[in-house]
């Protein structure tokens, strides 16, 4: 039962990411925002201690992604140069860790 | 020469008049049909495999703040990045990119778990651990993706320029 819930929520999370990246003019903005959203929500869930494996590892884990982040960074470097790639990396890291911290602080 | 060149143009204009209900002829879709479903299916499988790997390697779950136990997350992210780089270069098929690339690799890798673990390390003043974890994650992810692209080129038999 947990396995089924896990797969359903993971597919749902990945589906949201798919919808956003496909319909957003530039896909990397959607990935960026969803990574931040997922980090914030997982921070809240983890801090509250109410997180279940299906929601945290399944839904939010699949909604956020590291591989597309890496691919986007290389693509930005090739199209717009190293400076924008560095902004993308540090922006994602600084904001991602900040919102995760905020989420943890809210509920912990 | 002239009649031969004109014939396909006539055909094209006729087709447009006969089939006005198919907008895909005028504006070719950037993504194939059911793209979201492909990503969702791949994501479900990828995330399940990620959980299986993390469980097998005794990852305690996000936010438990045991810096020495987060390496399985680095591992799954690295695997996903290498595979994505390979797929994007080796396979030209857009559906494969969506199912295995954005779907499977996207589900296999995760940003939220990484961010919460790193933030938890920062909160507990494990600055060095947080810096090392973040540094290794980003470097292995980017390096893995570039490595994957080279592997894709080799597998596809294309010379790296």
Image: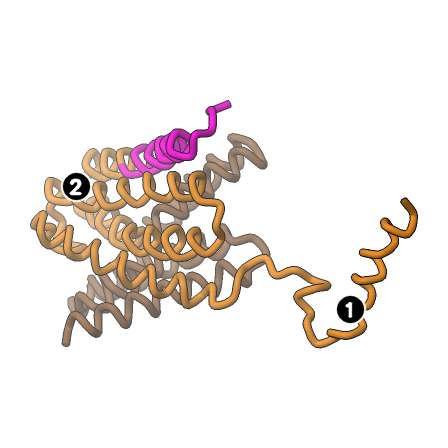
Chain colours: A brown, B orange
Which residue is drawn at the image coordinates 39% and 32% (left, top)?
B146
Q: Chain of mark 1?
A: B
Quarter occupied by residue A3: bottom left
Badge 1 density bin: few <14, some 14–19, many ≥20, Cα 10 Å = some
Q: Is residue A66 visible?
A: yes
Q: Is residue A38 above or below residue A98?
A: below
Residue B16 is tagged as: 1
* Residue under pointer 2: B71
- Where does the image place residue B80, in percent across and percent down from the top left? 30, 45
Badge 2 density bin: few <14, some 14–19, many ≥20, Cα 10 Å = some
Quarter of the N terminus of chain B within the rendering: top right
- The answer to whether B105 appears left or right of B128 in the picture is right
Which residue is drawn at the image coordinates 31% and 56% (left, top)?
B107
Which residue is drawn at the image coordinates 88% and 54% (left, top)?
B6
| Structural distance between the alpha carbons of marks 2 and 1 | 57 Å
- Where does the image place residue B93, in percent across and percent down from the top left? 48, 50
Q: Is residue A94 visible?
A: no
């Amino acid at each position: 039962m947990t396995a089924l819930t896990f797969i359903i929520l993971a597919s749902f999370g990945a589906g949201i990411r798919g919808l956003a990246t496909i319909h957003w003019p530039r896909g990397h903005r959607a990935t960026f925002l969803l990574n931040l959203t997922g980090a914030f929500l997982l921070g809240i869930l983890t801090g509250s201690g109410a997180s279940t494996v299906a929601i945290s590892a399944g839904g939010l884990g699949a909604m956020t992604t590291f591989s597309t982040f890496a691919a986007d960074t290389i693509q930005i470097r090739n199209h717009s140069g190293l400076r924008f790639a560095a902004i993308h990396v540090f922006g994602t890291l600084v904001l991602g860790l900040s919102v995760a911290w905020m989420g943890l602080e809210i509920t912990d | 020469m002239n009649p031969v060149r004109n014939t396909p143009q006539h055909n094209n204009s006729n087709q447009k008049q006969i089939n006005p209900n198919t907008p895909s002829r005028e504006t070719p879709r950037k993504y194939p049909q059911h793209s979201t479903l492909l990503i969702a299916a791949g994501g479900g499988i990828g995330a399940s495999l990620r959980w299986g790997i993390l469980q097998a390697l005794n990852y305690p779950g996000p936010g438990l703040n045991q810096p020495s136990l987060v390496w399985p997350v680095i591992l799954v992210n690295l695997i996903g990045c290498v595979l994505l780089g390979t797929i994007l270069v080796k396979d030209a098929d857009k559906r494969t990119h969506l199912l295995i690339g954005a779907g499977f690799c996207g589900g296999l890798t995760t940003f939220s778990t990484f961010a919460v673990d790193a933030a938890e390390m920062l909160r507990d003043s494990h600055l060095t651990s947080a810096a090392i974890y973040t540094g290794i994650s980003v470097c292995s992810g980017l390096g893995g993706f570039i490595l994957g692209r080279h592997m894709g080129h080799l597998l596809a038999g294309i010379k790296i320029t």
